[in-house]
Amino acid sequence: MLLIFFSLVNQVVNKGMVSYRDPESAPGRGQRTLHVTSEDVDLSKLFSRAVRELTSTGEDGPEVDLDSVEESIRANYAVEVEPGVDFRSVLLHSSRRAAKRGMVTQVESEDGPGFRPSTPGAGNKGKQVGQIELIVCQNNHH
């Protein structure tokens, strides 16, 4: 873990699987590029996904801060930011959007604001999320 702390190795979380890569190497196979072209870019889905992945590993505790989310996004994506665009400001606005939409929950702690995944059903106005109804049709032809 000291290697990660001193940024000698990047921790990459993809679909709950944790792997490690050299931060100086070219983007890994399958790594995507994130183009941030303006301050109005909505990264709320990406923000909430990063919060879910960081809290699912358990290493960051039940909630994560904005710095951890930014590090996770930069580790998983080749981030390209247009000149004059502040990536941290874009993330801050996206965190507010994600909280407003019920995708994440913002919590206050002694270390400052933190984020955790919302509980299923929070902020979705009564819709069921993540459940699939399976209907079995029986064919009575023998």
Image (spheres, rainbow, N blue to C red):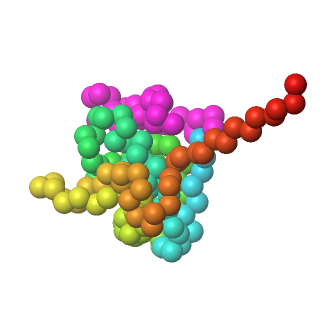
Where 35 falls versus 13 (above or below)? below
Instruction: Report the front residue among 118 and 46.
Output: 118
Residue 82 falls left or right of residue 117: right
Q: Is residue 134 magenta?
A: no
If the image is split into quadrants, where does the C terminus sit? top right
Instruction: Report the front residue among 102 and 66.
Output: 102
Image coords of residue 96 (percent x, y):
37, 68
The part of the chain drawn in magenta is 1-30
Where 93 falls versus 59 (above or below)? below
The residue shown at (26%, 55%) is 114
If the image is split into quadrants, where does the N terminus sit? top left
Picture quadrant of residue 20: top left
Residue 53 falls left or right of residue 66: right
Image coords of residue 82 (percent x, y):
54, 67
Image coords of residue 129 (percent x, y):
50, 53
Q: Residue furthest left?
A: 110
Q: Residue furthest right?
A: 142
Instruction: Report the front residue among 32 and 129.
Output: 129
The residue shown at (27%, 48%) is 63
Where 140 falls versus 84 (above or below)? above
Image coords of residue 30 (percent x, y):
63, 38
Where 46 falls versus 55 (above or below)? below
Q: Is residue 6 magenta?
A: yes
Task: Kindly tell me whether residue 66 is visible in this rendering.
Answer: no
The residue shown at (82%, 32%) is 140
Q: Residue furthest top?
A: 142
The residue shown at (32%, 51%) is 116
Residue 53 falls left or right of residue 141: left
Task: Kindly tell me whether residue 121 is visible in this rendering.
Answer: yes
